Structures are given as structure tokens and as C-alpha cells.
Amino acid sequence: MIRTYCCVLFLYFCSMETVVSGARPTGGLQIGNYFGAIRNFVQMQEEFDKCYFFVADYHSLTTHPEAKELNYHVKELLATYLACGLDPEKATIYIQSHLPQIPELYLLFNMFAYKGELEKVPTFKEKVRSQTESGKSVNAGLLTYPVLMSVDILIHRALKVPVGKDQLAHIEMARDYAKRFNYMTKSEYFPEPVGFSYTKELIKVPALDGSGKMSKSAANPNSAIFLMDEDKVLRKKIMRATTDSGPTEENQAKPEVIENLFDLMRLVSTEDVVCHYESAYNDCSIRYGDMKKQLAEDMAQLVNPIRERIKDLIKDETYLAKVVKDGGEQARESAAKTLKGAKELMGMNYFG
Ligand code: ADP
Ligand code: TRP
């Protein structure tokens, strides 16, 4: 009896924790975005009272400043959120640049973010390499990317941040900035946010060509499965995924590209199907062609209906505009409260 009561109480307090996350409108979403982030957003909106999900348009400007593309991708990302199941009645959905409090808190946070630590962030180093390789400059926004991301989270004093594994270093920095602010102001104003996933750990969906993480802005578009891929394209990409010549000894360890294929299968296929191909691998009878066909079929079952819903929603600009108008109002209210409190703690409430 007491145990049940404690359990209910625990769930009640959990549901009061604030959730924040977003994605960059740098292109159509791929299934890594879906499994690493969006799928968790959809489940969390059912379990948490305050969920904020946004389109990180400022973050896109750090690497993708083309106006026409940005404008389209913002609408496409909104349509994608809704097509995947985000519900404006259950979560606050908004565009980052609709909150003037974000650039203001970002400016304040920049005063206690240090150049040296920002230069050491692995994602910054990686972006400097890829920008330089493609002859593009590295702007100051790229250096302070983690500061802006910390502000996105802390502007609602959020605790839970559903993201993929690649974002862990950024979340750690958000925790550091929260701690630094609290220390400076002798307060406990900001909570220390943590990355969240319903899976055991934050996940990393692999690319189809063995090049690491699947990404919507990868150089090789065939390395990613996009939620907007037509059925035929999707199947072709999977059939062409990198494999090897097959196992030669029973129970031999899988090379990374094969493990990747199994990882993708674990995301979309039933346990029985995965087990079947695991044993076929272990007794060397596996035929990668058959495995890929099955994987393509199961992937298509997920992607096809989402793609069709995105196509419908993207045409309905009136509805998309209403969603972000309402969401923006709610988000601004929360952001204004947080900013006011932070400025007071910093002594910036000069005349009351
Ligand atoms: P991309 O790297 O494709 O441009 P974003 O940086 O906009 O994607 O990421 C949006 C969200 O999707 C983040 O939470 C990120 O961690 C997650 N995500 C992106 N790619 C993957 C992946 N391959 N596996 C798991 N999560 C991912
Ligand atoms: N940096 C994240 C990405 O590349 C996008 C993002 C911006 C974000 N601000 C955020 C994610 C705040 C979670 C919380 O995917």
C-alpha cells in the first residue's frame, strides 16, 4: 500500500519536471532525428505537464544561412513535428526566434562562458574542420553554439532534454552554466538539466555507409534515410547499404558496418525478425540481400505514413502559423518570467 502510494507520488513529481528540446531546420529530418529525438518528444508530451519543443532557427544560421532554404525548412520541420505526433494541445511548439528573451539571456550567459572551453568542444572542432574543408568561414555563432543551446533549455528552467547521443557534451555544458550562474548569484535558480531517452542510453543511429552517425547534413545524401524519402528511394538506399562478404566462422564478431545494419533493424523490426537474422549470422547462413529487403519493408512501414502527413501539413500554412502563434505566446510567458528572475539575481533590477 505504502509502496503504491510512493510510486504514485514519484510519478506525480516527475510529471511536473519541465522538458525542452529542439532540432535545427537545416534540411528534412532523417530517421536518426526521429529515433534520437522526436519519438521521445511524442511520448514525453503524454507524461510531462510542461513540454517545450521548438525549431532552432538561430542555430541553423551558424552553418546554413541561406534565406530561402531556412524559410522552407522551418515550415517543413514544424510540419514534421506534427506529422510525427506532436500535439499543440499537449506540448508548446514554437520557433526559437519568436522569443526575444532568448538572445537577451544568451548575451548575459556569454559573459560567463569562456573562449578556451568553447574552443575545446568536440562538435565545434568537428564543424571547424568541415566548414574549412568546404571553403566556408567559421562564425562567432558557431563558437558560442553551446551557450545558445544552454539558454534554450534554461530559459524554461527545464530539467529533461530528449536528444541523441551526439548532444551529450552540449547538455553537460548547460549543466556547467547553470551551476556557474547559481554559484555567482548564490542561488539555486537554474536546475541542472540532463539528456533523456526512453531507451537505456541516449542513442546514435548509424549512417548507411559506415561513415559514423546518420546526419541530415552529411556530404553523402545516400547515407541517410529521410522522413521525406519516397518508398522507392528509401528501399534503394537500404539495398545499397555497406556490408561485407559475410561471416566465415560460426559466432564470429560482427564488423561495425554489419552491427550498424542490425542496429537499424532493432529500431524498426520485431524481436523475432531480429533474432532470425542474428542466428542466421551466427551459423553463417545469412543473406544480406534478404535481411536488407526485410529492413527496407519495416522501415517503409514507419516512414511512408509520416511522409504523406508531412506533405499534407506543409500545404496548410494557416494551421502551421496558428500553432506557432499560440505556442510562441505560451513560451514567451515562461521565458519572460525566467529572464526577469535571472536579471534580478544579477542585480539588474536597478529602479525596482
Ligand atoms: P543533424 O545532425 O541530422 O543535422 P540535428 O543536429 O538537427 O540533426 O539534431 C536534432 C536532434 O536529432 C538532436 O537531438 C540530435 O541528437 C538527434 N540526432 C541527430 N542525428 C542523430 C542520430 N544519427 N542518432 C540519434 N540521434 C540523432
Ligand atoms: N543542438 C541541437 C542539435 O544540433 C539542437 C538544439 C538547439 C537543441 N537547442 C537545443 C536540442 C536545446 C535540445 C535542447 O540537434
Image (cartoon, rainbow, N blue to C red):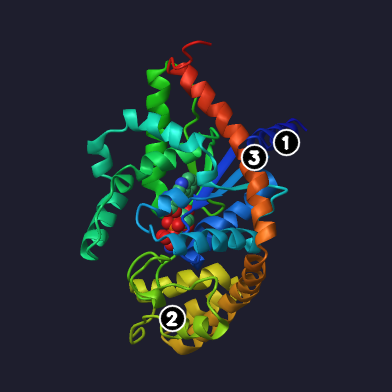
Above or below for 52 versus 112: below
Distance between mark 2 and mark 3 Cα atoms: 54 Å
**For the residue labelled by badge 2, is the local secondary structure a helix, a strand or a loop?**
helix
Residue 262, horizontal then vertical, whole percent: 46, 73
User: Residue at label 1?
Assistant: 8
Q: Earlier in the sequence, mark 2 or mark 1?
A: 1
Q: Is residue 203 visible?
A: no
Q: Quadrant of the N terminus?
A: top right
Above or below for 114 versus 58: above
Quadrant of residue 317 within the rendered picture: bottom right
Q: Which of the pair 278/122 is nearer the observer? A: 122
**For the residue labelled by badge 3, is the local secondary structure a helix, a strand or a loop?**
helix
Residue 196, horizontal then vertical, whole percent: 52, 47
Q: Is residue 230 visible?
A: yes
Count every numbered label the image shows and give the total: 3
Mark 2 within 8 Å of ligand 1, using the beta carbon:
no
User: Residue at label 2?
Assistant: 281
